Image (tube, rainbow, N blue to C red):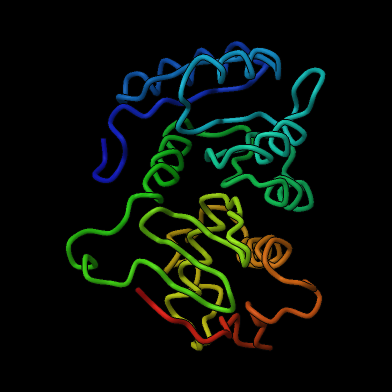
């Protein structure tokens, strides 16, 4: 297993295609991951009640409740990373999946080795950097907000915790740590560890949109995450560190 990835990570595969479930289960087990499988929303819910899941691989086209609906419901109570699988390759469907809170998106047919690489990349994201960053500030305060990088928590004014996905947190952290700097989309993707993982160049815009809905009084007139025409994005507020 790669450095920075939990060696005992537990993956839940939710797909109504038994061949795909069996293929991925066998492949991931051979590469040191623990695996559970489910064929629909009901089986997924039963599995998640009984085990601690580190990542969900979720098919969009499921019988009964769709993967997009399931993703939205999971995001209402959990930040567990989600990778969506789908035979639909239109950009609009990728956008919908990301808007629902998915961390990555893989179209079918796919190479299991590529999916494994994406799983490892997502599992690696929450791990903080090594000794070279040991003395960096871990708590950033701005406009009544608190970003606690050590605990990976965002606290709103009024001491209310705001739930963020892994990708949202990483992008916000990159913006805050580079406050007042204008960062291009490519720079943000690199700083947040998200380069090329969504497979199309609007992923940063979608994550910024999601963050604005959670943090801005009026997402249409943002005060925190500013758009710089032709440049990218800039985090505007003054910041105090601890």
Q: At 61% from the left edge and 56% from the top edge, which residue is drawn? A: 160
Front residue of 142/128: it is 142
Front residue of 172/32: it is 172
Q: At 40% from the left edge and 50% from the top edge, which residue is drawn? A: 126
Q: Quadrant of the N terminus?
A: top left
* Left or right: 187, with 208 as reference point: left
- Tell me the quarter of the picture where residue 61 sits: top right
Front residue of 102/73: it is 73
Identify the residue at the far left of this view: 131
* Left or right: 87, with 137 as reference point: right
Residue 45 position, x and y percent, is 64, 18
Residue 130 position, x and y percent, is 22, 58
* Left or right: 13, with 130 as reference point: right
Residue 7 visible in the displayed image: yes
- Tell me the quarter of the picture where residue 158 sits: bottom right
Identify the residue at the far front of this view: 158
Residue 187 visible in the displayed image: no
Q: At 53% from the left edge and 78% from the top edge, which residue is drawn? A: 142
Residue 101 position, x and y percent, is 66, 47
Q: At 66% from the left edge and 41% from the top edge, which residue is drawn? A: 75
């Amino acid at each position: 297993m790669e450095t920075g990835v939990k060696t005992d990570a537990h993956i839940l595969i939710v797909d109504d295609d038994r061949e795909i479930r069996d293929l991925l289960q066998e492949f991931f087990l051979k590469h040191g991951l623990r695996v559970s499988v489910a064929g629909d929303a009901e089986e997924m819910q039963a599995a998640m009640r009984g085990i601690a899941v580190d990542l969900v691989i979720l098919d969009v086209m499921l019988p009964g409740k769709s993967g997009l609906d399931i993703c939205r419901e999971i995001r209402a109570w959990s930040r567990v990373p989600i990778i969506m699988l789908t035979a639909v390759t239109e950009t609009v469907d990728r956008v919908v999946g990301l808007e629902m809170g998915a961390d990555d998106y893989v179209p079918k047919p796919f190479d299991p080795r590529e999916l494994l690489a994406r799983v490892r990349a997502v599992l690696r994201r929450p791990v903080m950097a090594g000794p070279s960053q040991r003395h960096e500030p871990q708590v950033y305060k701005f406009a009544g907000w608190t970003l606690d990088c050590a605990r990976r928590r965002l606290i709103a004014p009024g001491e209310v915790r705001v739930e963020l996905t892994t990708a949202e947190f990483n992008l916000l952290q990159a913006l805050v740590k580079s406050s007042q700097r204008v960062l291009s989309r490519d720079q943000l993707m690199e700083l947040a560890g998200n380069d090329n993982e969504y497979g199309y160049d609007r992923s940063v815009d979608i994550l910024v949109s999601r963050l604005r809905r959670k943090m801005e009084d009026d997402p249409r007139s943002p005060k925190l995450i500013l758009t710089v025409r032709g440049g990218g994005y800039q985090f505007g507020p003054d910041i105090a560190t601890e």
